[in-house]
Image (cartoon, grey):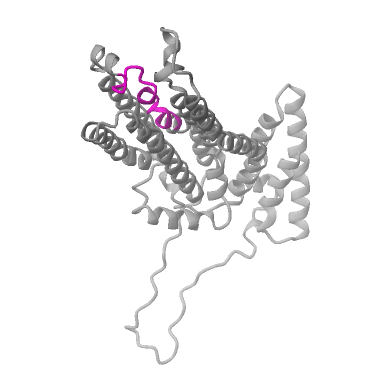
């Protein structure tokens, strides 16, 4: 019930505190409490009951005739009248042209935007995480040119690994772009081109109360994974240095002996931990963009943020911007890897460019996604 009461307080916060409005507020509170109790008694969960109550009683303009406060709703509303020209002012003096106000945001449409963000939250989370994991096929390539015998036996090992990486990157970019297309109809909300209404503000406050605990837990889990992620690389390097020079033939020869791959395995585990942290964090931050833009001053911040992104066209909820960067980032990484490997015969260490590039790209993607989320999103 606390979320419903907060919603109710926000609905009446901008109205004059007249006795009639206070009486109407008490009546509306009783109606909300009765509806909430009825829904819970029929088996609805707390969140479902709160959402349905807000949907049914969230528009004060529609409830005004029922509550008998239609005239009171407009008390104190500023009226604009044309100012008469002052004495001595030429008739031809330029007059200020009024700037049309942005249309008020509709509660149902705001909820639809939130629903799409929630439904596609795993797309952006999985897309960024899989981009970070894309170098694994290169790092763990068992037929690397540092092993001369296997290099002659499998001359296309490195090429196959590079091809798999490029295919994975392309698939991830397509997922992110597809998500941005689903969010395109709500660009006006994302960029703050609306006038905030008390109903939407109250609904956003309720959504924030519901989602904040889960978002905080997800952030703590992600932070723990990121802090622990370097351990596997350090341990892998130590084990790689101390690996015995002799090892049995078969699969184990890659993890011991002269061709030990413990360091590579440690790097892969580091990438997995960082990617899983991004997956958890990005999937839980979908509501943050909604609650930020539907707060007092949130629309103005979103418009300013949209302007900093070249009119809002460079970012589509994080996905399009990440896709543009990825289309340049990974081909450049491939070229650098091949040039370094062939010209300096550095196959035994050139693979390091992949985990480093992946970590940098993951950090950049997370920062850009979070930044676009603060502006609209």
Q: Would you say residue 319 sits in the magenta stretch?
A: no
Query: In the image, 372: left or right of 325?
Result: right
| Location of the N terminus (image quadrant) | top right
User: Considering depth in this image, is 37 or 263 the residue closer to the camera?
Assistant: 263
How far across and how far down the image is residue 211, in percent?
63, 38
Q: Which residue lies furthest to the front in this view?
A: 245
Residue 305 visible in the shown view? yes
User: Considering depth in this image, is 275 or 317 the residue closer to the camera?
Assistant: 275
How far across and how far down the image is residue 184, in percent?
38, 39
Give the residue displayed 45% in from the left and 81% down from the top.
84
Q: Would you say residue 141 sits in the magenta stretch?
A: yes
Is 13 located above or below residue 106 in the figure?
below
Residue 225 picture quarter: top right
Give the residue displayed 74% in from the left and 45% down from the top.
5
Span colored in magenta: 129-147
Is 58 located above or below residue 12 in the figure?
above
Query: In the image, 102: left or right of 21?
Result: left
User: Considering depth in this image, is 203 or 229 the residue closer to the camera?
Assistant: 229
Give the residue displayed 47% in from the left and 30% down from the top.
271
């Amino acid at each position: 019930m606390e979320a419903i009461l907060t919603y109710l307080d926000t609905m009446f916060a901008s109205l004059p505190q007249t006795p009639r409005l206070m009486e109407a507020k008490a009546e509306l509170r009783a109606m909300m409490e009765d509806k909430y109790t009825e829904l819970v008694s029929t088996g609805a969960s707390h969140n479902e009951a709160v959402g349905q109550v807000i949907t049914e009683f969230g528009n004060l303009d529609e409830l005004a005739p029922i509550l008998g406060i239609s005239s009171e709703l407009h008390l104190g509303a500023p009226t604009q009248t044309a100012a008469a020209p002052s004495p001595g002012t030429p008739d031809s003096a330029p007059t200020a042209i009024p700037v049309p106000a942005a249309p008020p945001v509709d509660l149902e449409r705001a909820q639809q935007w939130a629903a799409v963000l929630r439904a596609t939250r795993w797309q952006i989370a999985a897309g960024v995480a899989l981009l970070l994991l894309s170098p694994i096929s290169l790092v763990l390539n068992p037929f690397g040119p540092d092993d001369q015998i296997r290099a002659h036996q499998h001359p296309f090992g490195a090429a196959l690994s590079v091809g798999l990486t490029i295919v994975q990157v392309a698939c991830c970019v397509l997922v992110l772009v597809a998500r941005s297309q689903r969010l395109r109809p709500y660009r006006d909300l994302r960029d703050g081109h609306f006038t905030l209404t008390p109903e939407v503000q109250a609904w956003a406050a309720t959504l924030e109360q519901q989602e904040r605990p889960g978002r905080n837990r997800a952030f703590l889990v992600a932070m723990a994974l990121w802090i622990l992620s370097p351990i596997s690389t350090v341990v892998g390097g130590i084990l790689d240095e101390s690996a015995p020079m002799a090892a049995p033939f078969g699969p184990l020869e890659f993890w011991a002996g002269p061709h030990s791959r413990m360091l590579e395995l440690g790097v892969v585990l580091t990438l997995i931990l960082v990617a899983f942290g991004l997956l958890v964090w990005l999937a839980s931050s979908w509501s943050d963009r909604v609650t930020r833009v539907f707060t007092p001053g949130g629309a103005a911040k979103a418009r300013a943020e949209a302007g900093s992104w070249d009119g809002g066209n460079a970012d589509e909820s994080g996905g399009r911007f990440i896709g543009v960067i990825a289309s340049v980032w990974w081909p450049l990484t491939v070229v650098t890897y091949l040039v370094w490997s062939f010209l300096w015969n550095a196959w035994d260490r050139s693979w390091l460019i992949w985990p480093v590039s992946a970590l940098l790209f993951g950090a950049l993607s997370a920062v850009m996604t979070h930044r676009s989320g603060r502006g609209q999103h």
